[in-house]
Amino acid sequence: MSDTDTTPPIAEPLLEQTEELCDLHDHITRVVTGLDVPRTLFSDRYPDSGRADFGFESVILLFLYQHARGFDQSELHRRLAGTAYVYLRLDLPRPPTQQAISYIWRNRLSLADRRTIKATARVIQEIAADHGLLSADEPRLHPDEVDAATITDDHIMDAVEAARDRGLDEFDSDRAGNATFSDLVFFERQSYLNMADRGTTTCSNGSSKRFERLSDRKETPHGDTHLRTMKKTAAPPEQTTLDEYEDGCRPTDWGRIRDEVLDPFHRGVETILEEVRENGGIREPVIAAIDTTPWPVFTSPYKDDEDVAQDDESVVVNGEERYPRKEYPEMVHGLKDRHERGYEMATITIIGEDTPIVLGVEPVRRESDWETKDVGDTSQARIVEQLLEQAEQHVDIHKVFCDRGFDANGVRDTIDRRDTTYLIPKRKYEAEIEDIEELERESVTGAGVVRNLTHGHDGRVHTGSIMYVPSTEEEGDYAVFTTNRDVPVEQVKGFVGQYTQRWRIENEYKSIKEHFLPTVGSMDYRVRFLYFVIGVVMYNVWRLTNLLFRDAVDVHLGEHPPIPAGEFTEILAFCIVPGD
């Protein structure tokens, strides 16, 4: 007798449940996995749960699911092992291999049981079709369906490992091919240090010993070797090239460090975006946000009195004569607080409803009080231009939101020349708008707009709008925004309301600094810029991991992803420690 003999028995109690479940659920998978399988409906050939890797009821549901969905064993295994985590719904401890599926079907179930499962599954499929519940895809798990302990670290680490390899393996220290340790070992280790909030492997707080204990390798690099490798990775070639003189000027040392670090960074971004696109985490063209963030340093730029030499050149700061340190890093400058100083980085990030991936990083150069020669600043327009060039390698952008610190005609011109919409607030609020000529006023919202206004820069002119919306901070004041779009007055409130999405970049900086940036004493710009970029890589990997994990838990990702950054760092720290 074969599996295809006629008049097979049908498990009628399961069909009654199916009718009820079809009224409660929206997908055939939910219906099948919601069935309660009485043991009496099948033979006692299957071993009890204490002697079997997979429980009896889970196995029956597994094969009902297979045949109700019309899958062969290869497709069944793919569904179980896929990102939808179907096996969790079936209460299986892990996805069984295709060989295990075949063995259980042929050797653990009787012929009568197999015939009953197939016959019952055909009717379940018919009932689900009558209710419109057949679908080629799989539903996501809802949090109410899953016990908190069901989605284990193993499941999360599977997603983390899938993402991890899409961020770090592009970096190259250009070390000898016969080196004891591969570059990936050092970058895995540095990522651990970033997440453990440690900048060196030789510190006395035990992070080095913990790293060595977690590693599966017999030997790990010495701390000094590690630091030399990091510096070497960020160091540009000793010889400059003609391409570096493209604008006719000698390239700066910090600019060449930038190029050396960002080249592998962008290869990693492209790999991450491929995965994001495959998992529906981005819809182009995107909205992007641009802002800057400081990384403070605590070493003074001025010499102590006892270190001042007779021929030292002085500067006057706040009426006081001071003597700058000659070797003080040129990329450190004063911050907003009068007594703070530090490095500053600018980034461009996808915002809106898409997965927030950082697309570009740009170092910021500002002139400082302690500098004795004219070195010039990086203009805001130049920063924006560089960030847009980086981002446009990867995505199409249709809107750019900038902080009010970028309120400059050069910035507006840079964005407009790319046929991209900008939304930039003015630096100051307006107390009165009634007397402004050409003002259109919206009576309900109180918003106003001046349309067809010209913005000029460097001989080029484009038109746009200035929009006024009642301030949420000061009674009677108006926040003022500029855009290169012609915005009707009735659309002002809604258009400006999109600007709140820019706050995602502020949360990005908070996450990077709290979870992905190490404590660093070194003032070496090679180290600082490389470590910041690695922190950005870790942030992108975190965001990608949450996108991959989205298929397991039906939650809104937004600013509350299912894997918090703090928990992610703990899991990833154990996941990426070197070891084959």
Image (cartoon, grey):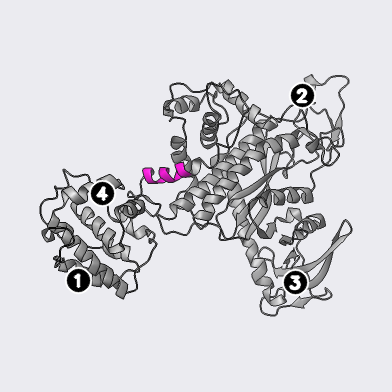
Q: Which amino acid does label 3 sit on?
A: Asp
Q: Are marks 4 and 2 in contact (CB under 8 Å)?
A: no
Circle 4 SS class = helix
Whether residue 157 is in magenta: the answer is yes
Look at the magenta stretch and give its main secondary structure: helix
Could you say which quadrant of the image residue 513 lies in?
top right
Going from N to C along the chain, the mark reached first, 2 or 3, is 2
Camera sees residue 344: yes
Q: In this view, does 85 lie to the left or right of 108?
A: right
Residue drawn at (64%, 35%) of the image = 530
> Please, what secondary structure does the residue beneath circle 2 have?
loop
Q: Mark 4 sits on what residue?
A: 101
Q: Which of marks 1 and 2 is nearer the N terminus?
A: 1
Q: Position of residue 222 (x, y in %)?
A: 54, 21
Q: Residues within 10 Å of mark 3 (few under 14, many from 20)?
A: some
Q: What residue type is labelled 4?
A: Ile
| Region rendered in magenta | 154-162
The first of marks 4 and 1 along the sequence is 1
Q: Residue 486 carries which label?
A: 3
Q: Residue drawn 59% across and 55% down?
A: 504
Q: Which residue is drawn at 88% across and 21% down?
A: 311
Q: Residue at 65% of width from left, 56% of height from top? A: 288
Seen in the image, is 522 located left or right of residue 247? left
Instruction: Quickly name the residue at label 2.
Output: 304
